[in-house]
Image (spheres, rainbow, N blue to C red):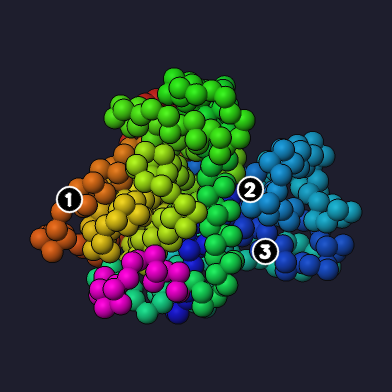
Amino acid sequence: MNQHLSVFDMLKIGIGPSSSHTLGPWKACRDWGKVFCGREKSVKAINVYLYGSLALTGKGHYTDKAVVLGLSGYDPETIPLLQMQQVLDEVSQKNQLYLTKDIAIPFDITKNICFYKDQSLPYHPNALKLEIQYEDGVIDSSVYYSIGGGFIVKAGPQTKEACAALPVSAYTTAKELSEICRKKECRISDIVLKNELIYRTESEVRSGLLRIWEVMKEAAYEGCHKEGVLPGGLNVKRRAFDMNKQLLRVHNYSTPDEWLEAMKVGGDFHKVIMRVSCIAIAVNEVNASMGRIVTAPTNGSAGVIPAVLFYYVCFSGQRVEEEDIIRFLLTAAEIGKFFKIGATISAAAGGCQAEIGVSSSMAAAALTECLGGSPDQALMAAEIAAEHHLGLTCDPIGGLVQIPCIERNSMGAVKAITASMIALASDPASAKVSLDNVIKTMKETAENMHSKYKETSLGGLAVNVGVNVPEC
């Protein structure tokens, strides 16, 4: 199957807390809603069946809410955040789902969305079946797989191939990319931009990536300026607010950009590391509360790349322009593609090595290029960051993307910066391990990892901490 993977596939604007359990089902339901376009008046009932990991951790990941919003036709990238709760409250109170502004059908969230925790469907752990009943007795159904990072696949003749890795452009390995960069004497971001220009204008690429940067800033700003307890039942206190307050020396600001400038004032090693952690935590606190973030490459790992990008902008000692931000994001996305192609970016398929590990690798390569590293040094940084996340399990307590997920983003961000520093001080020609080696190893590790450590909340911290979480 030949399919181009765009930068905007790897970095997409969405709603938290999970790309595979929230964003994916949302997109699947919205996509499926097109089948009855024009036939809404004859719809009698809709049922949604969740399987495997979607069922086991769906409540904590707000899969049921995503289903309602998707079936209601809302776009996760553009829906006003305040409107989401209004829609959910109305459906819950009236037990009605609005297919259009004027057409509603009976829909009870507690009955028409079914969680089959002991059943799985072929090809991927994240599966949902959508069933529609018409007034004339006809029943249509479709199966979708949410395969990580907000990617969805509709079941059909090519399902197995579609759920597998997707080739991209003229190269499929980091080694091949390295050879192209060497031959053309260019940077990784130059190659990525050239690929994007086949499908979009340069203006579209530029504006799209700057929009992604704006959403990252807005999420970080919101997370650093909001107090309270995260929803879900674990009673996790938001920490980014206090951390941000302690770290700032300048408090006279009112916008994300002014706040960013305030961060640049002062910054010893301790405060820089704390600031990186603060940004990562802030973004994922927004994610955990069903806020808008950038899937990078997943929602559960959404804080890593923004945190490292903030580090580059505020503390690298370089003058950073918009073109540098674009270059950072282009390079980061390209590394994510290699993992999408050769392994997985789904925690339900490969544990958290496929989320935090991949995001840390993406950020490390991007930072290295932007700090003047060669393409081979950028790929080396990506390898180092990913290598030291191999085997990382996904065991969210209570099925919520909070513990250990939020702190884990700060760990991934700091590892990315460390990996970049090591690569910039090294000769890649002497490296014993390549990025391709690590990706192959991640794939094998994912296949051998016990299913209870793959976003099911049936193993690890999820069972050993012993916290009882009420159904959300």
Label 1: element kind: loop
The one nearer the camera, 406 or 35, is 406
The three-letter amino acid code for the residue at tag 2 is Ala
Indicate which disc, 3 or 1, sits on the residue closer to the N terminus: 3
The image quarter in which residue 206 lies: bottom right
Q: Which mark is residue 66?
A: 2
Report the residue at 56% width, 39% height from top.
Answer: 257
Q: In this view of the protein, which residue sits in the foreground, 299 or 39?
A: 299
- Residue that carries the numbered disc 3 in the rendered image: 32
Does the CB distance between marks 2 and 3 fall below 8 Å?
no
Name the one closer to the observer, 393 or 355: 355
Helix, strand or loop for disc 3: helix
Which residue: 16% across, 60% down? 428
The location of residue 409, given as percent across then percent down, is 39, 39
What residue is drawn where x is 62% and y is 66%?
A: 142
- Regarding residue 466, the answer to whether it shows in the image is yes
Please name the amino acid that badge 1 sits on: Ala
| 45 in relation to 264, above or below | below
Q: How many marks?
A: 3
Q: Which residues are magenta?
A: 178-195
Closer to the eye: label 3 or 1: 1
Q: Which mark is residue 425?
A: 1
Structural distance between the alpha carbons of marks 1 and 2: 45 Å
